[in-house]
Amino acid sequence: MDARTMTKKKIKKVKVPTVLVKYPCPKCGNYYLPEYHQKDGKAVMVCLTHGIFKTSVAVSLNFRKFCSKIGSKPHRSPVYYSSSEKKVQRYLERRNLIEGIEYFHNSRIKCKIKGRVRYFWLDFIIPKLDLVIEASPRIWHKLWNRAEADARKRTLLKAMGLNLIELDEKDLRRLNKRRKKSKYPRPENCKKLDKIFGCENQYES
């Protein structure tokens, strides 16, 4: 018995028209049309890999609107900073680094992979330190199913001799916190940056 047949037997159908909007599987990120909708406002889908999953139509609609708003921002412009990137910018400016001279924001690099030209955009690159900093909240990379693209970028940067530090939500939250009493230790990625810039004594351990 396949997953589609199981869906029809396990969940009672209701007479609600199916809207032609696809929803992502929370495990793999692949999009599927609803099999049907339930009275409680949830759409029921069948992922070919992970089976049945449900999502709230209202929440998904609001999230798609939010993603559309975020996606309309000029993310590849050197002058546009997301809220996450502003935290990294603040950290670098505290180290007295000058943008456009000592570090570059939203910088594009070109390379060839298997004979094909590829472009990668870097959140921050500091040439004199051979350092790349990525402000990478996990939610965006997980939802957009970017694991393969992220792995290619890491391999490429390593081959170019660049040191990559990826800051997630926890790292970014603690990045600019000065030394004070706290039950939360400083994240490892923040410690790595502190060591590179020689400012370990300015932040809590």
Image: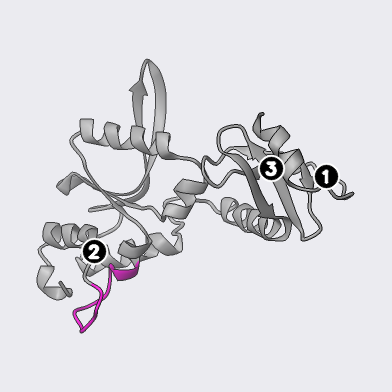
- Looking at the image, the residue that sits furthest to the top is 115
Q: List the residue tagged with mark 2.
A: 187
Disc 2 marks a residue whose amino acid type is Pro
Helix, strand or loop at mark 1: loop
Crowd rating for badge 3 (residues with CA inside 10 Å; few <14, some 14–19, many 20+): many
Look at the image and give the residue range highlighted in magenta.
Answer: 173-184
Query: Label 1, label 3: how many angstroms apart (C-alpha)?
Result: 11 Å
Residue at (25% x, 60% y) in the render:
98
Which quarter of the rendered picture does the N terminus lie within?
top right
Disc 3 marks a residue whose amino acid type is Met
Magenta: main secondary structure equals loop
Residue at (41% x, 27% y) in the render:
118
Mark closer to the observer (3, 2): 3
- Is 165 in front, or is 95? 165
Mark closest to the chain's N terminus, 2 or 1: 1
Say the numbered circle drawn on residue 18: 1
Q: List the residue tagged with mark 3.
A: 45
The colour scheme applied to this rendered structure is: one colour
Mark closest to the chain's N terminus, 1 or 3: 1
Mark closer to the observer (1, 3): 3
Query: Label 2, label 1: how many angstroms apart (C-alpha)?
Result: 46 Å
Residue at (25% x, 74% y) in the render:
184
Q: Is residue 35 left or right of residue 97?
A: right
- Looking at the image, the residue that sits furthest to the right is 15
Disc 1 marks a residue whose amino acid type is Thr
